[in-house]
Amino acid sequence: MIVVADASPLQYLILVDQISLLERLYGSVLVPEAVAAELRAPRAPASVRAWMLDPPPWVEIASVTAEEVATIPVPA
């Protein structure tokens, strides 16, 4: 299953110390570089920045092109 989200769900799961739910539900998570950059930004909470600077092994950060995003099916 592919789940695409902005930074908010990751940020709030980190803040409430429940980010491990994603690993338990999905095994691995692909975070687009743009989302990772938002989570590392100076205005992000310190705990979120720290987590994103040293993500766990089940998190992969990758560049995603606009063409790749366009191929993701949108649920009806």
Image (cartoon, rainbow, N blue to C red):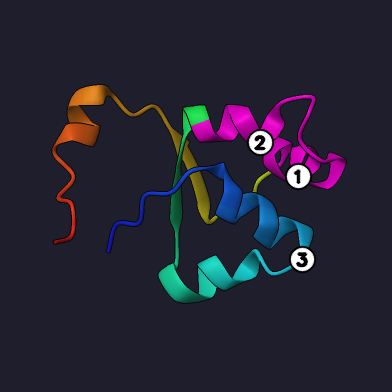
Give the residue pinned by disc 3: 16
* Residue at left offset 53%, top offset 50%: 59
Q: List the residue tagged with mark 2.
A: 39
| Mark 1–mark 3 CB contact (< 8 Å) | no
Viewer-side residue, 54 vs 69: 69
What kind of residue is marked 1?
Answer: Val
Crowd tier of the residue under label 2, counting other residues whose Cα lies within 10 Å: few below 14, some 14–19, many 20 or above: many
- Above or below for 11 versus 26: above
**Amino acid, disc 3:** Val
Q: Position of residue 63 (x, y in %)?
A: 39, 27
Q: Earlier in the sequence, mark 3 or mark 2?
A: 3
Write down the region rendered in magenta: 35-54
Residue at the spot 33% in from the left edge and 29% down from the top edge = 64
Specify whether residue 61 is painted magenta: no
Q: Secondary structure at mark 1?
A: helix
| Of callouts 1 and 2, the N-terminal one | 2
Three-letter amino acid code of the residue under disc 2? Leu
Coordinates of residue 11 in the picture (x, y in percent): 67, 50
The vertical placement of 3 against 22, above or below, is above
